[in-house]
Amino acid sequence: MAKVVKFGGSSLADANQFRKVAQIIRSDSKRRYVVPSAPGKRFADDTKVTDMLYNCYDAVGKGKNATVEFLPIAERFNGIIGDLGLTISLDDEFEIITENFKKRAGRDYAASRGEYLNGIILANFLGFEFVDAAKCVFFTAGGEFDVDLTDACLASVLEGYSEAVIPGFYGAKPDGTIKTFTRGGSDFTGSVVAKAIGAELYENWTDVSGFLAADPRIVEDPEIIDYITYKELRELSYMGASVLHQDAIFPVRTAKIPINIRNTNLPDDPGTMIVPEAPEKTGGRVITGIAGKKHFSVISIEKDEMNSEVGFLRRLLTVLDHEGVGFEHIPTGIDTMSLVVNSDELSDHPNLVKYITDITHPNHIEVINNLALVAVVGRSMKEKRGTATRIFAALSHADINIKMIDQGSSELNIIVGIDEKDFEKAIRVIYDMFMLSE
Ligand code: ASP
């Protein structure tokens, strides 16, 4: 059995970080397939190599000299090679890249070179095989990720190597053009590789010791979540919590492979395990985490006897469909329906309320802005009584008015809508209620 280990940009930002990575890999012989990001920031206002590459490519497009513009990037890689005492030279690669920049090979090509070059260095340092992702991660001609082709190709290529480095973030279209995933996409590559080789574990090494139960910019020193299910993670990520690329759970999820978020700088910390089903007893907490987002609006619709009007919701949804508007929630009353949308939808579709009025003929319709949503997520809510009461009590004691409540029948989360000005306070009081008092 093997583990796939993905290292983020901060884990590979300089030679010192490379050494930590090598030590981590060598300390477990199952860590055989490695997915690196491009070198990230070494200090707060440093620039990630990926951003340097985008900037360089754009500068060349504006007529600047490719070799000169590429120099700082070459220096970063040469610095790592030199500090590690490696004997390889990437000069030929640098020349090919600058030539391709001049030929306008594409911004995706440009960005992907960070992972590509870093992969070559890491493979050399570890003594592992380098497998170019362009040869085994595929997109369709239309730019969609080609799951089946990638899965089959990765599985057969990697079968030939007991240890390999596969750069993250990019793949190729059928004509060989390089395409990248969205930013942070090396997480996704790691997941794809783990699925393809049937890994027992996908370790995602970063610069934090796991997924936090709340945003550390809001709650001081929040707890690290030890176990979280894929579903809970989806809820929390959707609501703004971020450590992992939002698509990264999908490939491993189908194969039920757990993901372990780990800290390269504190490798003894157990990190967070993202699993299909969490073990029964995991700290006894009712809630797993709290996340939230601002910038929502509610279109509140009132109509007498709405509850007995057949097809009301369908008509409303037809308008959204037609306008291409997505919605977040639709809490309903007997004669009321509230449509919660991202506020941008209203500015992008200025006639939305008028169209809804024309088709549903309400008695009253109004838009309430500046709504924030807070999601309290926890798989254990199902078994425990009084979770909602405690959330509402915490908010009420803090004098926070609840404008909307939503709990799905899966009982995985409770979402409350509050005024944006109360957002941070709401998260803090809910956190205190559940995490400090249990
Ligand atoms: N290097 C890419 C980025 O900065 C991809 C990644 O790190 O996952 O977004």
Image (tube, rainbow, N blue to C red):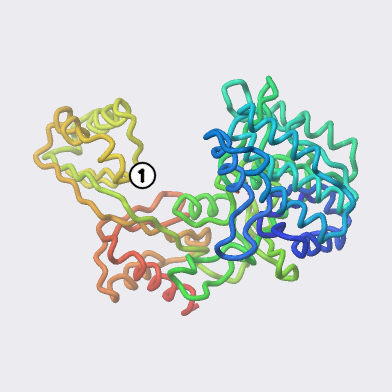
Residue in the foreground of this view, choosing between 194 and 387: 194
Query: In the shown orientation, is residue 436 left or right of residue 354?
Result: right
Residue at the extreme bottom: 437
Q: State the residue position of label 1.
A: 328
Q: Is residue 394 above or below residue 409?
A: below
Image height of 74 relative to 423, above or below: above
Q: Is residue 245 left or right of residue 67?
A: left
Q: Which amino acid is tagged 1?
A: Glu
Q: Is residue 249 something one can see in this rendering?
A: no
User: Residue 6, position in %: x, y?
Assistant: 72, 51
55 vs 424, nearest the viewer: 55
* Side of 431 where 129 appears, left or right: right
Q: Give me the residue at 19% from left, 45% from top.
A: 300
Is the CB of mark 1 within 8 Å of ligand 1?
no
Q: Position of residue 40 (x, y in %)?
A: 64, 55
Q: Residues within 10 Å of mark 1 (few under 14, many from 20)?
A: few
Element under disc 1: loop
Residue 303 lies left or right of residue 67; in this view the side is left
Closer to the camera in the image, 281 or 188:
188
